[in-house]
Amino acid sequence: MAPGSPWRPPSLPLLLLLTLAAGAGGLEFGGGPGQWARYARWAGAASSGELSFSLRTNATRALLLYLDDGGDCDFLELLLVDGRLRLRFTLSCAEPATLQLDTPVADDRWHMVLLTRDARRTALAVDGEARAAEVRSKRREMQVASDLFVGGIPPDVRLSALTLSTVKYEPPFRGLLANLKLGERPPALLGSQGLRGAAADPLCAPARNPCANGGLCTVLAPGEVGCDCSHTGFGGKFCSEGEGDGWGLVRGDVGGVRSRACEGPEDRVGLIQLSCA
């Protein structure tokens, strides 16, 4: 198949698209200098595997994902370019394949992204659009030696260890990213800098996250977590009540989370709006 040619993806159920942010593990990327997230290696990228996530952003250019073989030949890079997704990858030092989707994603709305590796071929889908490209290489498998970098490259990663050194100078991602999965499982977050969200603190871990319907859990202070419901269509302290927007604030500890009593129909702590239905 020629690089950039149309490809029919596995069907993305409407229910999935309507619940893009419903799972735990969402992260808010501020887009500041030095920002990065490092996940465990995506072994499936070598020959056959799927990576999926949902995103919400208004950034027109930013680094989303990157992995490589440690500075030799193989790499996979997913960028936002002109507000659209652009994928580049190669195997065995072959001419890199490039594809860019037409669907604009820098509209501050949620979008579902699916990346599928299959030997020399890689497919990329967002919402209802999908394309695939193939490299002309002698080898069928991609060598994967690096961790999976999301939203930026850690400063301790040397340029000599990057197959595509220019990736280190791409703007960091700014926006929300949720439901990152390798196959059916979320990867282990090995470290991060400049991020907020459910995966960034034990109080917001999946087993303790009090935010429903994809509300973004953020630790505000020791023992205090807030639920940002603004992108969910729900309100209340836990994003579980009807339609609304704003923040809820709850207090808790490692053993559990309990609600903060509201002093009136609406309370404010700094810039954090508390919806007290």
Image: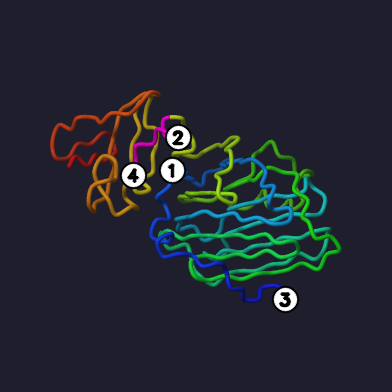
Badge 2 amino acid: Ala
First reached walking from the N terminus: tag 3 or tag 2: 3
The local crowd at label 4, few if under 14, some if 14 to 19, many if 20 or more residues have their Cα within 10 Å, is many
- Which of labels 3 and 4 is toward the front? 4
The local crowd at label 2, few if under 14, some if 14 to 19, many if 20 or more residues have their Cα within 10 Å, is some
Mark identifier at residue 24: 1
Residue 3 x, y percent position in the rendering: 71, 73
First reached walking from the N terminus: tag 3 or tag 4: 3
Residues marked 3 and 2 touching at CB (< 8 Å): no
Residues marked 2 and 1 touching at CB (< 8 Å): yes
Badge 4 amino acid: Ala
Residue drawn at point x = 77 percent, y = 51 percent: 163
Element at label 1: loop
> Which range of residues does the magenta coloring cover?
203-211
Identify residue for label 3: 2
Residue drawn at point x = 58 percent, y = 41 percent: 37
Between 237 and 219, the residue placed more toward the observer is 237
Residue 76 located left or right of residue 152: right
Residue 116 x, y percent position in the rendering: 63, 60
Residue 206 located left or right of residue 102: left
Residues marked 3 and 4 touching at CB (< 8 Å): no
Query: Count of labels shown?
Result: 4
Q: CA distance from mark 4 to mark 1?
A: 9 Å
Element at label 4: loop
Establish if 143 lies above or below 137: above
Identify residue for label 4: 212
The local crowd at label 1, few if under 14, some if 14 to 19, many if 20 or more residues have their Cα within 10 Å, is many
Identify residue for label 2: 205
Quadrant in which the C terminus appears:
top left
Q: CA distance from mark 3 to mark 4?
A: 43 Å
